């Protein structure tokens, strides 16, 4: 097993940077379904280019590499303690080289371990089997889509769909609602894995395991296969579309498994996965630890996804350079495409909580500035400077309790994130003259290329790389106005319209 750690490192690198063949096929179909020049079309063009850039750079498709989760089948006599230790060493190395973002934080203190090791991290599931090879499967599922996982206990009243009984129609109502509630916050178009039955914990595990099925497979249970096809068809009439901007493709795959349960419980557990569906597997020689073969890899997996050199622009894009004025901001309206240049600052969960009770460091001002909801992958150069290797947006709704107050306190004029924000932020944008700009979720390589320089960082030691306040100089950074300073919100409109569409399918 001398080569086992090397094999795991290859698995991590490939999973992070190069999407599986079946996922690529599904995304390619979605690209063709959306009208060129539409918001959905712009999203899919950016996604396609980002996929190509990740392969070329051998860098994360999405900056949020999630919680590395391994499912391992091992033959009799395999040394699981050795494999566990080698996996941990490979995770540390992958984090050091930027293939994984350091994501492991203490649940109480919030302290980042810096190497993706911690209590129960990485997640490793061992199961025996009667084959000779060792099978190692890895899924990297980001926090944005993980937060849109949902579990139902039947019977229940499902919003917009009514009573869901303990039958297949009840399960159907749960799944329609599960797709609807994700909106653009889970980086649609997405995939869902579903576990019907089990208990609360095993149901979620079963749901996540369904994400290791091929997108194009057929469920051996005829009833479940029919339900998978029904959900896929129905969800794509909702009009949520890529990034929640509206469009024809909301769901790219639905996979359902079932487990026996106790009579008192009927759980429907849903694992929602974003378009950046990162899961691969390898079969490993039990003597050498070398890779014998790859799973989810077809012969044509490296075909270029994008057409042309960049995303299509119309010439009507608005260039925004901080400091922004009230007049410029209030002239923007929902649907405008903007290109941000100049100074940009990051701020996520820990930053928003901190700044509610403290001031910025002395000498730091963001008056009239742009705040980016982003937890980048950042590496340190030999000369002490920093370079950003992945920098897509994080889900903004987590900052809803704070955002309006932070805008007022810091004098911000623009917030960039994904998935939109709620009524408190919308009111704050209108009152203080600011806008919300939706970047394309998961496009970590595309946006990293827009960052020309890291000009500084604050709170790095206290908060860790993803949560620190990074200061960037950016150029030609594209985003779409989805909440303006005049009280308009595309997210509110899409949510309402898609709710009516869901109810009509119920």
Image: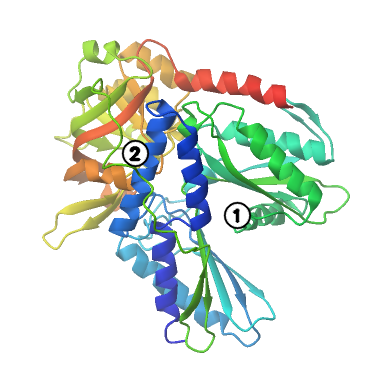
Query: What SS does tag 2 mark?
Result: helix
Q: Is residue 120 visible?
A: no
Residue underneath mark 1 = 211
Residue underneath mark 2 = 351
Q: Residue at x 69, y 46 (%)?
A: 269
Q: Residue at x 38, y 60 (%)?
A: 113
71 vs 370, nearest the viewer = 71
Task: Tell me which corner region of the image, top left, top right, bottom left or bottom right, holds residue 220.
Answer: bottom right
Return the x and y of residue 65 as percentages of the image width and height.
42, 54
Report crowding for label 1: few under 14, some 14 to 19, many 20 or more residues within 10 A (C-alpha): many
Task: Tell me which corner region of the image, top left, top right, bottom left or bottom right, holds residue 368.
Answer: top left
Return the x and y of residue 341 as percentages of the image width and height.
19, 31
Q: Residue furthest right?
A: 263
In the image, is 471 to the left or to the right of 290?
left
In the image, is 438 to the left or to the right of 131?
left
Return the x and y of residue 141 as percentages of the image width and height.
50, 52
- 159 relative to 47, above or below: above
- 261 relative to 484, above or below: below
399 vs 111, nearest the viewer = 399
- 348 relative to 202, above or below: above
- 82 relative to 462, above or below: below
Callout count: 2
In the image, is 167 to the left or to the right of 338?
right
Q: Residue furthest left?
A: 383
Q: Tag 1 or tag 2, which sits nearer the N-term?
A: 1
| Mark toward the viewer: 2 or 1 | 1
Q: Residue at x 35, y 11 (%)?
A: 431
What separation in Å lies between label 2 and label 1 (alpha carbons)? Answer: 33 Å
Report crowding for label 2: few under 14, some 14 to 19, many 20 or more residues within 10 A (C-alpha): some
Query: What SS does tag 1 mark?
Result: loop
2 and 1 marks in contact (CB < 8 Å)? no
């Amino acid at each position: 097993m001398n080569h086992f750690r090397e094999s795991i490192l290859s698995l991590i690198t490939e999973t992070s940077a190069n999407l599986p063949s079946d996922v690529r096929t599904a995304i390619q179909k979605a690209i063709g379904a959306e009208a060129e020049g539409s918001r959905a079309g712009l999203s899919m063009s950016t996604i396609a280019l980002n996929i190509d850039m990740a392969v070329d750079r051998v860098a994360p498709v999405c900056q949020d590499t999630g919680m590395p989760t391994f499912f391992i089948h091992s033959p009799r006599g395999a040394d699981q303690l050795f494999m566990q230790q080698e996996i941990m060493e490979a995770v540390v190395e992958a984090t050091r080289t930027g293939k994984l973002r350091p994501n492991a934080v203490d649940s109480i203190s919030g302290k980042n371990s810096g190497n993706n090791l911690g209590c129960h991290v990485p997640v490793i599931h061992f199961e025996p089997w009667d084959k000779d090879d060792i099978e190692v499967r890895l899924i990297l599922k980001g926090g944005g889509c993980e937060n849109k996982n949902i579990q139902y206990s039947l019977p229940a009243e499902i919003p917009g769909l009514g009573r869901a009984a303990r039958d297949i129609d009840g399960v159907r109502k749960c799944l329609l609602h599960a797709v609807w509630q994700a909106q653009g916050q889970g980086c649609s178009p997405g995939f869902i894995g579903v576990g019907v039955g089990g208990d609360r914990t095993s149901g979620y595990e079963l749901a996540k395991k369904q994400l290791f099925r091929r997108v194009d497979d057929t469920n051996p249970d005829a009833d479940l296969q029919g339900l998978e096809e029904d959900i896929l068809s129905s969800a794509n009439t909702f009009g949520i579309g890529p990034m929640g901007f509206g469009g024809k493709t909301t769901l790219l795959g639905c996979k359902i498994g079932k487990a026996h349960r106790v009579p008192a419980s009927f759980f429907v557990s849903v694992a929602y996965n974003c378009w950046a569906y990162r899961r691969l597997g390898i079969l490993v020689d039990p003597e050498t630890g070398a890779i014998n073969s790859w799973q989810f890899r077809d012969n044509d997996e490296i075909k270029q996804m994008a057409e042309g050199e960049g995303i299509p622009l119309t010439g009507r894009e608005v260039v925004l350079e901080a400091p922004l004025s009230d007049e410029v901001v209030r002239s923007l309206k929902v649907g405008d495409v903007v290109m941000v240049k100049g100074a940009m600052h990051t701020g996520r969960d820990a930053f928003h909580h901190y700044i509610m009770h403290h001031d910025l460091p002395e000498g730091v001002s963001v008056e009239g500035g742009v705040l980016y909801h982003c937890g980048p992958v950042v590496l340190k150069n030999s000369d002490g400077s920093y370079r950003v290797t992945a920098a897509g947006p994080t889900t903004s709704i987590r900052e809803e309790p704070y955002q309006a107050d932070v805008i007022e306190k810091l004098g911000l004029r623009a917030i960039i994130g994904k998935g939109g924000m709620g009524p408190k932020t919308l009111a704050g944008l209108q009152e203080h003259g600011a806008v919300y700009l939706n970047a394309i979720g998961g496009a970590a390589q595309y946006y990293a290329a827009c960052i020309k320089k890291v000009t500084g960082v604050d709170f790095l030691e206290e908060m860790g790389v993803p949560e620190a306040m990074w200061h960037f100089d950016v150029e030609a950074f594209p985003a779409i106005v989805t909440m303006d300073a005049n009280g308009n919100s595309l997210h509110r409109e899409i949510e309402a319209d898609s709710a009516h569409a869901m109810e009509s399918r119920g």
